[in-house]
Amino acid sequence: MMFRHPHDREILRLAVPAFGALVAEPLFLLTDSVIVGRLGTVSLGALGVAGQILGTLVNLCVFLAYGTTASVSRQVGAGNHRAAVRQGIDGLWLAVLIGVGLIAAGRPLVPAVVRAFGASTVIAPQAETYVHVSLLGVPAMLIVLAGTGVLRGMQDTRTPLFVSVGMFAANAGLNALLVLGMGWGIAGSAWGTVLAQTGGAAAYVVMVVRGARTYGAPLRPDLRGLRASATAGVGLLIRTLSLRVVLVVATMVAARLGDPQIAAHQIAANIWTLTVFALDAIAIAGQAITGRQLGAGDVAGARAATRRMIEWGAACGVVFTLALFAVRPWLPDAFTGDAAVRSQLLGALVIVALLQPIAGVVFVLDGVLIGAGDMGYLAVAGVIQTAAFLPVAWLAYALGGGLVSLWLAMGVWMTARLITLGLRARSDAWLVAGAVRG
């Protein structure tokens, strides 16, 4: 029965705060949009382009959080808290190195990248200003990712929630002061976010340093640890790139289907993203629990927890399916008054709703395998899943199937993820016990 399983309390303890932290993240950009919107359409458009660039950068570097969670939680499970903190310190140093490298390599490329993201000649200057300033905050942003991974690995998702809320509040206040109060324009919005991120990074550094002093872990970088973190990150980077290819191609296909289709697709994608937050929270719990249990050598416990989290993911998916079908007749009216867009969205929402139970299981399996440190398989599986999606997406465009056909292609992608991840989870190959995955 629900809430009667031995793992339910632990799953909820980790997943509920993780959900809050996930929701806080998009509030950064939402706050920026509300404040920058006061500056006019050009500034708002520039923020949209810059937000896409920085969002892509964050997604590509999310391995700093996921990889650190996996390695730290294994050491915690093995009872090696000193080594766990040492792994976290290596993650922070890797974040700093990558962040500094991105500043040096990225600044000369900003104009070209802004143009590549489709900014008009009117919007481009302001978008470049925002990205130039925001690049200075990239090391802090990556430290936040790595620090979040450290605490999740230590089985703490509540503190990252508090840090996220603090960053959100600071971001809102600083943006209002610098943009509206001091008249810095869009640069003020970027500086507000950079300062908020820096504050969040400082909080994580303080917590990790405190842990290092408690367990006697050195603060200097360790070359072997950095190499191990970077190696694990390669597999996760390939996986993330595969995911981004699917999302970008889907947007490109929708844009070529027509204006009503791309408008409806963006709305459907935003609704999909909203449901992903709750499902991804269970996946984060999966990362922490799986890593800790395998680190402790409890293979049977890892399997039992995985089965229960799959049940949770599927159950949440069913709830979202029913909820989406319940609000579907009225949901388009909240976004558009265009009859053509409304018609396209109504069709797409049927597929979005039906995919929820599959998504619930897929995200849990993804989190479990990340927690197990099975990065090589995730990289290969990601390429296979993308290869399954691309020809079907092309057919949706070539045959003029409309937006429903495109979302059916997304369904093929999710089914490919379910099959590849499910087959792996049924095997014993990912169940490698020990403080360090061999």
Image (cartoon, grey):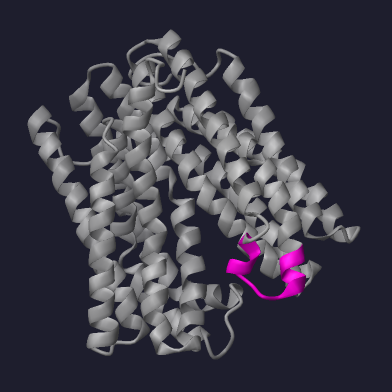
Q: Nearer the viewer, residue 270 or 153?
A: 270
| Residue at (43, 47) in percent of width and height | 62
**Residue 69 in the figure: left or right of residue 115:** left
Is residue 387 something one can see in this rendering?
A: no
- Please provide percent x and percent y for residue 359: 60, 38
Membership of 338 in magenta stretch: yes
Which image quadrant for residue 222? Answer: top left
Which image quadrant for residue 380? Answer: top right
| Up-down relation of residue 151 to residue 310 (above or below) | below
| Residue at (29, 38) in percent of width and height | 157
Membership of 142 in magenta stretch: no
| Up-down relation of residue 128 to residue 103 (above or below) | below
| Residue at (23, 26) in percent of width and height | 83
- Please provide percent x and percent y for residue 378: 57, 33
- Please provide percent x and percent y for residue 437: 41, 21
Which image quadrant for residue 103? Answer: bottom left
Magenta segment, which residues? Answer: 331-343
| Up-down relation of residue 297 to residue 128 (above or below) | above
**Residue 402 in the figure: left or right of residue 109:** right
**Residue 160 in the figure: left or right of residue 40:** left
Main secondary structure found in the magenta portion? helix
